[in-house]
Amino acid sequence: MSYQLALRGNIKAAMARRDWLGLQAAEAIGLTPAQFSSRLHGRTEWRINELVSLANALEVPFSLLVEGIDSEAVMSA
């Protein structure tokens, strides 16, 4: 599984637990819905500060969003 799929799954699961849509998540971290969607679907790379902000907004540990991702998978992508 690519790290992007793992990241997307983790983010979507955290959003579902809060009953959030992409619009709410995008607004919470200062992105447009299109920018958020682009990141969520792997067309644009996430910035670490965006993921930290998203974790804070969703009230989950950052580690939950990146669970299952290792550095080798990211470096080989």
Image (cartoon, rainbow, N blue to C red):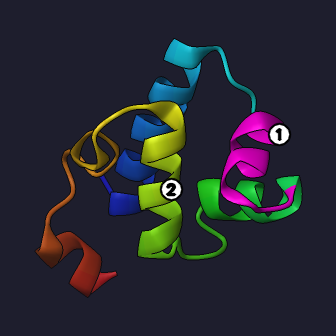
Toward which corner of the image does residue 71 lie, by quadrant? bottom left
Which residue matches tag 1?
23
* Residue 67 on the magenta segment: no
- Residue range (magenta): 22-32
Quick one: label 1 or label 2, which is nearer the N terminus?
A: 1
Visible residue check, residue 41 = no
Question: Which residue corresponds to the image point at 35% horizontal and 33% vertical from the top-left?
Answer: 60
Which x, y percent locates residue 74? 27, 76
Task: Give the side of residue 75 with respect to residue 41, left or right.
Answer: left
The disc labelled 1 sits on which kind of residue?
Answer: Leu
The front one of 74 and 50 is 50
Crowd around label 2: few <14 · some 14–19 · many ≥20 (10 Å):
some
On residue 53, the disc is 2
* Residue 30 on the magenta segment: yes
Which x, y percent locates residue 77? 34, 81
Question: Which residue corresponds to the image point at 43% horizontal and 45% vertical from the top-left?
Answer: 55
The front one of 27 and 4 is 27
SS type, badge 2: helix
